[in-house]
């Protein structure tokens, strides 16, 4: 069966690297808390109850699509659409189209940002490849009005950042839950890492300030550790024990 995403695609390289995926996860956790439509996930209470686990779940769904055959990927995309439809029926209101675009957009953006932070910036060809892969995902989910090219997406991404983000009661509640679930000192490291990853608009709304001095050297050191294949002990130190199985579950996709 033909793959949904080509075997040589940059999308597979990024989403098959657990270290990059964890960075995507950290950046997405910051921006997602600011989204004007985040109240939809509070409707089921799954997000405030276990925000870290919920974000890991999103990553797992993304990997199941990226590393699947076309048939398997479309089955997963259909399942996701069915879940969303059930939530809409339960609330008696549709999730706005722009909210679907926002989630797709942040996955694209943090894929690029995470790879750049840990390794190197993507080339123009790799950026086009990244976007075309996620464009397939968006079309599979029935997300309308998606830009056709990476440059067009960049312009629309900027508009979404300006229009669709706000610091709300849900933002405050989510960050309180982040701190509760990861502990104080890990939470401080998370904020440092997010300050390095997120766009200026997100940094401003969250009051993260400029890129910080503590995390930069740590990321550089971790990059070396990853090259030596010694990242597991570091991951276990930085991630609460309850989520170690979630980290392990990211690795099979890389093979």
Image (tube, rainbow, N blue to C red):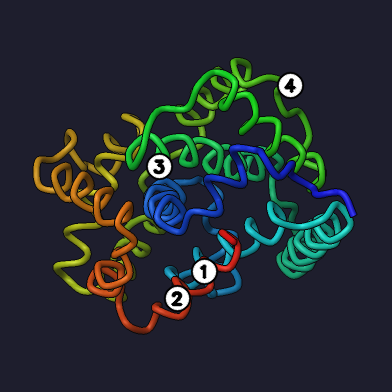
Vertical side of 45 occupied by 111: above or below: above
Q: Earlier in the sequence, mark 2 or mark 3?
A: 2
> Is label 2 in contact with label 4 (beta carbons under 8 Å)?
no
> Is label 4 in contact with label 3 (beta carbons under 8 Å)?
no
Quadrant where the C terminus sits is: bottom right
Q: Which mark is residue 222?
A: none
Seen at 72% across and 29% down, the residue is 146
Q: Earlier in the sequence, mark 1 or mark 3?
A: 1
Real-space Cα separation, disc 2 to disc 3, in angstroms? 23 Å
In front of the other: 252 or 26 = 252
Q: Earlier in the sequence, mark 4 or mark 3?
A: 3
Total marks drawn? Answer: 4
- Residue corresponding to mark 3: 114
Real-space Cα separation, disc 1 to disc 3, in angstroms? 20 Å
Q: Earlier in the sequence, mark 2 or mark 4?
A: 2
Tell which tag, 1 or 4, sits nearer the viewer: 4
Q: Position of residue 112 (x, y in %)?
A: 47, 35
Numbered disc 3: secondary structure: helix
Q: Which mark is residue 50?
A: 2
- Residue corresponding to mark 1: 54
Q: Is residue 140 left or right of residue 169?
A: right
Real-space Cα separation, disc 2 to disc 4, in angstroms? 35 Å
Quadrant where the N terminus sits is: bottom right
Numbered disc 1: secondary structure: helix
Real-space Cα separation, disc 4 to disc 3, in angstroms? 23 Å
- Residue corresponding to mark 4: 148
């Amino acid at each position: 069966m033909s793959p949904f995403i080509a075997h040589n695609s940059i999308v597979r390289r990024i989403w098959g690297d657990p270290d990059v995926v964890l960075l995507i996860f950290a950046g997405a956790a910051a921006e997602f808390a600011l989204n004007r439509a985040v109240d939809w996930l509070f409707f089921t209470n799954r997000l405030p109850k276990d925000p870290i686990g919920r974000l890991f779940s999103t990553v797992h769904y993304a990997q199941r699509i990226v590393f699947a055959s076309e048939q398997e990927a479309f089955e997963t995309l259909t399942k996701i659409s069915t879940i969303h439809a059930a939530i809409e029926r339960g609330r008696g209101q549709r999730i706005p189209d722009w909210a679907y675009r926002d989630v797709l957009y942040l996955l694209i953006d943090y894929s690029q940002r995470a790879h750049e932070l840990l390794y190197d910036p993507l080339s123009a060809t790799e950026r086009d490849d990244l976007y075309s892969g996620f464009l397939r995902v968006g079309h599979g989910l029935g997300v309308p009005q998606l830009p056709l090219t990476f440059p067009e997406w960049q312009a629309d991404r900027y508009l979404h950042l300006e229009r669709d983000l706000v610091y709300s009661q849900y933002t405050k509640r989510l960050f309180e839950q982040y701190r509760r679930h990861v502990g104080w000192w890990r939470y401080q490291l998370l904020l440092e890492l997010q300050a390095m990853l997120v766009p200026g608009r997100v940094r401003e709304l969250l009051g993260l300030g400029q890129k910080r001095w503590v995390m930069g050297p740590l990321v550089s050191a971790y990059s070396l550790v990853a090259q030596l294949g010694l990242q597991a002990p570091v991951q276990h130190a930085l991630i609460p024990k309850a989520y170690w199985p979630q980290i392990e579950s990211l690795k099979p996709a890389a093979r």
